[in-house]
């Protein structure tokens, strides 16, 4: 069933105090410049057991948003030429809409990712200079969903969650609130200075009709068993670390993806890309409130001996990740041109069909469910359908009993997973144990 919404109000929220003149120019970092020109969409769903005063909730969200924007002033600005953000308090679009066709429980128990975009403030295929938009969705049952679109050009996943949690802390100032506002650290451009990006076209955004996004939920105990199985049979050259649940799951999914695909061309190269947060790779580690894009891709082109299969890839991915240490970071800061040339060639090869990648990104262990605006933690935090092809994003479930995963693939590739018995054996219900069918379909 399609979601129908009715717009109630639209307004612009600005910082509660003017941004000082010396902060009007927020410089993008080199990693910001490399980020996809796309919005990162998140939806925070909240259920209410008693009566709901929507006017009070709406006013509280807007007032606290205005307050927190004094610290997160780039969100109220406009992105210019992939170089900087003009921070002159242009403001954030804030919409309030009424959901006419669904109860909140309907959306949570039977999510339709292709319809959830109607709960967002922007269309994902219409990227503008606006850095952030918010939409308050009001359900007839009294529940709400807060939809956000955050420009990937200025913030990564952890920056998004940290911002929302600080916004919630500004809203929920009662004595029982344990969360305090921690101001962002805007030093990214000094760590990774911006560069001349001539010739770099960015991450390709595929035609939205070619990509299907579906959510699957993996049972935590089954993933743990998979992880233990790999641990027993791999030998890592530089470390004896146990493979993480995301590393084990990525290797398992990669194997299904690549072995079931016909070779488009003899010279086609297949590569697995693992997106990793860099903050913990520095010595000393950078704090979580460092703002911007702090991620890099560890890429492996598996060459597996006969019979090695999944665990061989786990070993290779772990070895590639181990290479990204503090020494690597220093070399990367100095030798940016080498990386930029590599990214250009990778984009060119992908466009020609000479390189096929499957990208894994994880927000597991991130503070996804900490956003308490004064009415409790969110019932569900969700993404929506994405337009970046061959991408899988992992996210912990609310209670930690599983891993939600968002697959963005062509339809024929998606079917190979859905028809694979080993894959379906790892699945549980989409949200908790509400839905019997473990495949959440569009």
Image: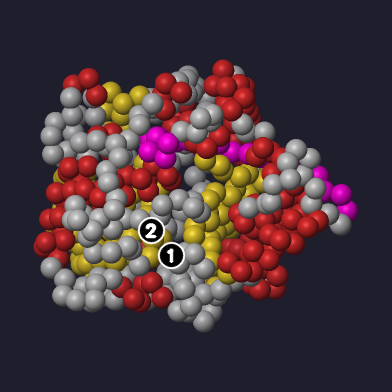
Q: Is residue 271 visible?
A: no
Q: Using the image, determine if residue 288 lies above or below residue 430.
A: above
Q: Is residue 176 visible?
A: yes
The quarter of the picture where residue 14 lies is top left
Disc 1 designates what residue? 398
What's the residue at 18%, 21% (across, down)? 21
- Dot 1 falls on a residue whose secondary structure is loop
- Residue 253 is left or right of residue 289, and the answer is right
Magenta span of residues: 287-306
Residue 324: percent from left, percent from top = 62, 33
Q: Using the image, determine if residue 216 lies above or below residue 63.
A: below
What's the residue at 52%, 40% (across, down)? 277
Is 299 in the magenta?
Answer: yes
What's the residue at 18%, 25% (across, down)? 20
The Cα atoms of the two marked residues, 1 and 2, are separated by 7 Å
- Dot 2 falls on a residue whose secondary structure is loop
Residue 369 bears which disc, if any? Answer: 2
Specify which label sits upstream in the sequence, 1 or 2: 2
Majority secondary structure in the magenta region: loop
Report the quarter where the N terminus lies: bottom left
Is 335 in the magenta?
Answer: no
């Amino acid at each position: 069933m399609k979601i129908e919404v009715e717009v109630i109000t639209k307004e612009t929220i600005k910082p509660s105090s003017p941004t000082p003149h010396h902060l009007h120019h927020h410089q993008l970092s080199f990693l910001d410049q490399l980020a996809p020109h796309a919005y990162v969409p998140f939806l925070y769903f909240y259920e209410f057991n008693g009566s709901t005063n929507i006017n009070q909730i709406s006013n509280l969200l807007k007032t606290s948003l205005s307050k927190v924007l004094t610290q997160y002033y780039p969100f109220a600005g406009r992105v210019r030429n992939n170089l900087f953000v003009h921070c002159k308090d242009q403001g954030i679009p804030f919409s309030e809409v009424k959901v006419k066709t669904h109860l909140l429980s309907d959306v949570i128990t039977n999510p339709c990712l292709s319809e959830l975009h109607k709960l967002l403030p922007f269309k994902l295929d219409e990227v503008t200079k606006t850095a952030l938009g918010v939409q308050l969705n009001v359900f007839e049952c009294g529940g709400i969903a807060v939809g956000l679109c955050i420009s990937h050009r200025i913030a990564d996943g952890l920056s998004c969650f940290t911002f929302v949690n600080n916004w919630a802390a500004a809203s929920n100032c009662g004595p029982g609130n344990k969360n305090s506002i921690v101001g962002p650290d805007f030093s990214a451009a000094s760590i990774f200075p911006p560069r001349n990006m001539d010739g770099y076209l960015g991450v390709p955004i595929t035609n939205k009709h070619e990509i299907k996004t579906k959510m699957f939920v993996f049972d935590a105990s089954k993933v743990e068993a998979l992880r233990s199985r790999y641990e027993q049979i791999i030998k890592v050259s530089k470390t004896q670390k146990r493979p993480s649940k995301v590393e084990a799951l990525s290797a398992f999914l990669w194997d299904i993806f690549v072995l079931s695909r016909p070779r488009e061309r003899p010279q086609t190269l297949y590569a697995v890309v693992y997106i990793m947060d860099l903050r913990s790779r520095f010595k000393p580690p950078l704090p979580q409130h460092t703002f911007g894009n702090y991620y890099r891709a560890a890429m492996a082109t598996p060459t597996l001996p006969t019979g090695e299969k999944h665990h061989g890839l786990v070993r290779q991915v772990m070895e590639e990740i181990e290479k990204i240490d503090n020494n690597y970071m220093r070399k990367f800061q100095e030798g940016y041109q080498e990386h930029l040339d590599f990214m250009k060639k990778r984009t060119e090869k992908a466009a020609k069909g000479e390189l096929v990648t499957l990208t894994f990104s994880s927000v597991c262990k991130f503070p996804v469910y900490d956003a308490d605006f004064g009415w409790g933690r969110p019932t569900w935090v969700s993404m929506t359908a994405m337009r970046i092809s061959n991408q899988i994003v992992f996210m912990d479930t609310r209670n930690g009993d599983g891993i939600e995963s968002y697959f963005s693939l062509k339809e024929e590739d998606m079917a190979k997973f859905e028809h694979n018995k080993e894959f379906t054996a790892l699945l549980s219900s989409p949200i908790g144990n509400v839905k019997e069918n473990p495949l959440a379909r569009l």
